[in-house]
Amino acid sequence: MTQLARRLTLLDAVVIGLGSMIGAGVFAVWAPAAAVAGGGLFVGLALAAVVAYCNATSSAQLAAAYPASGGTYIYGREVLGDWWGFLAGWGFVIGKAASAAAMALTFAAYLVPSGWWQRPVAALAVIALVAVNYHGVTRTAFLTRVIVSVVLVVLAWAVFASWTAWTPGVWDGLVLLEAGPYGVLQSAGLLFFAFAGYARIATMGEEVVSPRRTIPRAILIALGLAVIVYAFVGLGVVGALGTQALASSTAPLVDAVGGGPVQEWVVRVGGAVASLGALLALVAGIGRTSLAMARNGDLPRGLAAVHERYQVPHVAEITLGVVVSLLVLAVDLRGVIGFSSFGVLVYYFVANLAALRQRDGRMFPRWLQVLGLVLCGLLVVTLPWPSVVLGVLVYVVGVVGRLVALRRRSA
């Protein structure tokens, strides 16, 4: 079996994780969170951060013990059994493929606000980023550094502009639990979508230098930085717009910054670049998880090929590029935040359970994993019901498909 090359440093891993978390979500997730929770979105944000921390510690502990491509798919197989690994991997690949299509369309929507060429632009973005990934993980890391730098500069400016535009009295009328516990939990599930990118570091564990030391540090550093960024942006958009106006906004940061067309285009460029960063990390993460699943026969084995020169899962990434390009040309998946959250929460449920059952190489107390299990399960069942129904159907298709494949293999 051909192995991937270990070329990613601690800085590379942190940047890739940060690029995954500070994507288009930071520009768009505030409106749906405000719609379901009002002022309670801040409680939802704190809860999402706690869930993310529990999951991050589990992922870090497992990644140090199993530093191979595939993330929780590998951890579930090694600690819990093949079916647990499959459930994690299947939800990740399908959910994140839909997210990749959504990120491509979001990029095009920011760059080209209207017109028939939005979809072709989105497909071209997918093809371009697959080409970057194809030519080696160091090129992926370099482009991610550039993207994260641009996005952080734009966000810093947007935070300053929105804080200086705070509406007088907006904080006086803010009620943290105005939508009740259910609304807060729904907002936490939606906001969790924004923090889920640290999994990308673990899925690329086969390419990280000194993985047992680097991966846990990178995951926690990237998550900490992302939480700080989201807290500042959240305070800015709520302070400038108020929760009612925020809930109906289609471009929260654009509305919060205000001003003329120059300010709007600065935010739009930032959103477009952030979408590219998230899409780049998604392509890398899905490709590595597909590689791991193909090695074990849970996806077609041809996807396990590794390029001799560039040492990347080139067949898996090209296949992903084709599938996502067709999706963006055919359907609009920008409303898949809830569905993606469903798959990712199941993914981390398996991660927490595997870390709880892990015997060797323990780094964090078991109560963190128990808390992660409970909160992941709670957020899954409180997601909007269409997201839950779609998520269950996708898992049924995956389970039936694997049963058929196993039966044919045994015959």
Image: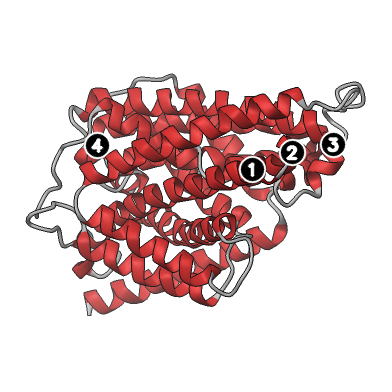
Q: CA distance from mark 4 to mark 2?
A: 50 Å
Contact check, label 1 and label 2, Cβ < 8 Å = yes
Callout 4, which amino acid? Tyr
Location of the N terminus (image quadrant): bottom left
Callout 2, which amino acid? Gly
- Evaluate whether residue 377 shows in this view: no
Q: Which residue does the numbered mark 4 point to in the structure image? A: 66
- For residue 262, the mark is 1
Q: Secondary structure at mark 3?
A: helix
Q: Secondary structure at mark 1?
A: helix
Residue 358 image point, x, y percent? 34, 31
* Of pointers 4 and 1, the one earlier in the residue sequence: 4
Mark nearest the camera among 2 and 3 is 2
Residue 148 image point, x, y percent? 42, 36
Mark nearest the camera among 1 and 3 is 1
Q: CA distance from mark 4 to mark 1?
A: 48 Å
Q: CA distance from mark 4 to mark 3?
A: 41 Å
Callout 1, which amino acid? Val
- For residue 180, the mark is 3
Kindly identify the residue that appears in the image at 35 percent across and 20 percent down.
Answer: 363
Residue 30 image point, x, y percent? 70, 41
Residue 143 image point, x, y percent? 32, 43
Q: CA distance from mark 2 to mark 3?
A: 35 Å
Crowd band around label 4 with a 10 angstrom C-alpha radius: few (<14), some (14–19), many (20+): many
- Evaluate whether residue 145 shows in this view: yes
Q: CA distance from mark 1 to mark 3?
A: 39 Å
Q: Secondary structure at mark 2?
A: loop
Q: CA distance from mark 1 to mark 2?
A: 8 Å
